[in-house]
Image (tube, helix red, strand yellow):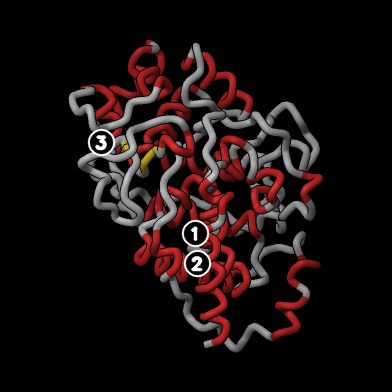
Amino acid sequence: MAELLAAAATLRAAAATPSARRATRANCAFFPLSSASPALARVGLRAAPSRLPQRARAVRCMAAAAASDPAQLKAAREDIRELLGTTHCHPILVRLGWHDAGTYDKNIEEWPQRGGANGSLRFDVELKHGANAGLINALKLVQPIKDKYPSISYADLFQLASATAIEEAGGPKLPMKYGRVDVTGPEQCPPEGKLPDAGPSAPADHLREVFYRMGLDDKEIVVLSGAHTLGRSRPERSGWGKPETKYTKNGPGAPGGQSWTAEWLKFDNSYFKEIKEKRDQDLLVLPTDAALFEDPTFKVYAEKYAEDQDTFFEDYAGAHAKLSNQGAKFDPPQGFSLDD
């Protein structure tokens, strides 16, 4: 019980921390900021299993480069599902996984200099990047799960949380693998500027510049953009969106912000439908969203996904897993699945 009270106190403090409320107009990145819910202060975790000895907890910081334990990852997945059910934090957990992975540079061979999903986003120096404003709240949400299961890496936890959030929101089953190795210190964090801007002067060119660097193509740029079907943008953090709309004024979670879709906790293809039609002024359309139907090559895929949700789901599953894997270092080298 003492551990549960301590975890709840940590989350209450996180919800009030000034850094969690820091405003930035620098970069909206993959997911312009969804809110941290007041439910942060109410979230509880199941008691840690007795099979985790205190000694294992004590040495977890020294084992950052060890492979994740599959049994603990499976147990963590159940805790993430409970967390999603109580806090409705699907969008920010997706964003957490994407932003840890999205620093990958295919032109750099060495790990961890090449970026990718390596757990570096847990360090303050990277959390303070303009594109990551508000992600301190996501870290505060998953940190108690990491503490409970010390034999999993942060890199795996972030990707597990992201994938589970997609699936629990009604999205496709993702072909994820695990075993990612963590970086060990803040000096291994990538430089700022690796993630896309939401309002560049030439949106299509900017998207290609950033995503091509990650080894992704036009089809993958468009299909991954479809994850904006989840979440809201908050102008006080990102500089984009309305303070509130008819879809966000009552939450769930902290009220406010502007969403891309009316049902912004449901993963479907409505993002593409709404961007195409632009009929509802209460729904957000960023320059990088509009570019999907303005650029001739992007438009072919965007039109397809607006018409065919099954194709969107199939293509999204592969692209999400690819983003999650590229640049990561696995132990064992081939990784492992939780569903074998």
Q: Report the Cα–Cα distance between label 1 and label 2.
A: 5 Å
| Residue occupying image coordinates x 47% and y 16% | 204
The answer to whether residue 334 shows anywhere in this view is no
Residue 12 — which label?
2
Give residue 87's quadrant in the image. bottom left
Is residue 276 shown above or below 236? Answer: above
Badge 1: residue crowd in 10 Å (few <14, some 14–19, many ≥20): many
| Residue occupying image coordinates x 37% and y 44% | 231
Q: Nearer the viewer, residue 18 or 37?
A: 18
**First in sequence: mark 3 or mark 2?**
2
Asked if disc 3 and disc 2 are in contact, CB closer than 8 Å, the reply is no
| Element assignment for label 1 | helix
- In the rendered image, residue 209, in percent from the top left (x then y), is placed at 58, 19
The answer to whether residue 26 shows anywhere in this view is yes
Q: Which residue is mark 3?
A: 270
Type of amino acid at the residue the image marks with label 1: Ala
| Element assignment for label 2 | helix
Type of amino acid at the residue the image marks with label 2: Arg
- In the rendered image, residue 20, in percent from the top left (x then y), is placed at 54, 51
Q: Which residue is mark 1?
A: 15
Q: Nearer the viewer, residue 125 or 274?
A: 125
Q: Report the Cα–Cα distance between label 3 and label 2.
A: 34 Å
Is residue 23 shown above or below 90? Answer: above
| Element assignment for label 3 | helix
**First in sequence: mark 1 or mark 3?**
1
